[in-house]
Every structure is written in structure tokens, then in C-alpha cells.
Amino acid sequence: MTRSREDLRSEVLRAIARWQIPIIQLNGMIAERLGMTWTDLQALYVLANQGPATPGELARRVNLTSGSASRMIERLVQAGFARRVPDDHDRRKVLIVPDERAVRRVGGLYDSLNEHHRRDLEGFDKAELATLLRFLESATRQTEDEIERFPG
């Protein structure tokens, strides 16, 4: 039986929703193994992938109040996952910088899963990969926009 375009779209959305649950579970397990909260792990990911940030910028990136972000930053610094450094462009500002060794150690906990994903992606041709990338980038932007619009 041939599935309609609408059926395939619905199946893709359900598959993404199903995938989100084990991702959240794995991240929780990794955070627990590292002795940090899920939000701490998320902040470390953001710093490692988007670059150093002021405390206010980091708070916005992980959707925390400034007080909660301050406590999170202190936990990350105390545990050696990040450090505070003066901003080269404005010495009045402090940047939160991820510790590269810590990032590699945490990233290593995802190596097995990432290798499985790499192997899965080998079965896709260039056009399919471009389509998948286009969807994922759009989905990320739309989700970030939804977070901004979400009634607080």
C-alpha cells in the first residue's frame, strides 16, 4: 500500500516526537552521571556549540532567570566544566567559557550514539541529506521562536 504525502508527514512528526523521549532520557542519564542537572548539561552544550557568553546571554540561551543562571554558572565553574574570564573587548564584562577537556569528556559520552547516527546517514544520498538538514534547521528555528512566544 502506498502512503499518501499527508500520511508520511504525520508519520515523520510522530517519529520525531517518539525520538525526543529517549533523547531527553539519555541527556538526563548523562547529566546524572556527571553530577549535574539537565539544565547544566544544556548550558555546557550551548557554550561548547555557540561559544562563550556573558551570564545574561547564557541565561537567555537556556531560558533561565538571571538568579537561576548565576547559580548554574557557579555549579559549572565549581565542577570544572566552565570558567569565568574577562571579556577582551570590554573588561567590565565577564564571559563564561567552557573547559575544552570537560567538553571532550562530556562529548565522549555521546560518541557511540553519534557513530550509529553517522552510519545511518551513510544510507542517504546528498539530496536526501540536504533535505534532512533543511528540515532540522527550520525545526530548530521554529522551536526557538515558539520558546520566545510561549506565554510566561
Image (tube, rainbow, N blue to C red):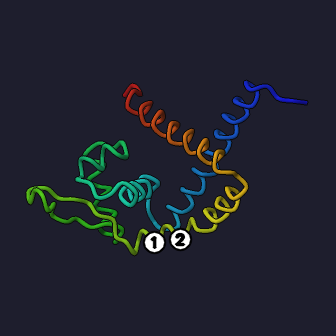
The amino acid marked with disc number 1 is Arg
* Above or below 122: residue 7: above
Residue at position x 68%, y 51% from top?
125
* Residue identifier under label 2: 108
Classify residue 67 as left or right of residue 115: left
Q: Label 2, label 1: how many angstroms apart (C-alpha)?
A: 6 Å
- Among all residues in the image, which is located at the extreme bottom? 101
* Above or below 49: residue 59: above
* Residue identifier under label 1: 104
Proximity of marks 2 and 1: CB atoms separated by less than 8 Å: yes
Classify residue 91 as left or right of residue 101: left
Question: 67 and 2: which one is in front?
Answer: 2
* Above or below 131: residue 108: below
- Among all residues in the image, which is located at the extreme front? 126
Rendered location of residue 16, percent (x, y): 64, 40
Classify residue 133 as left or right of residue 84: right
Rendered location of residue 37, percent (x, y): 44, 57
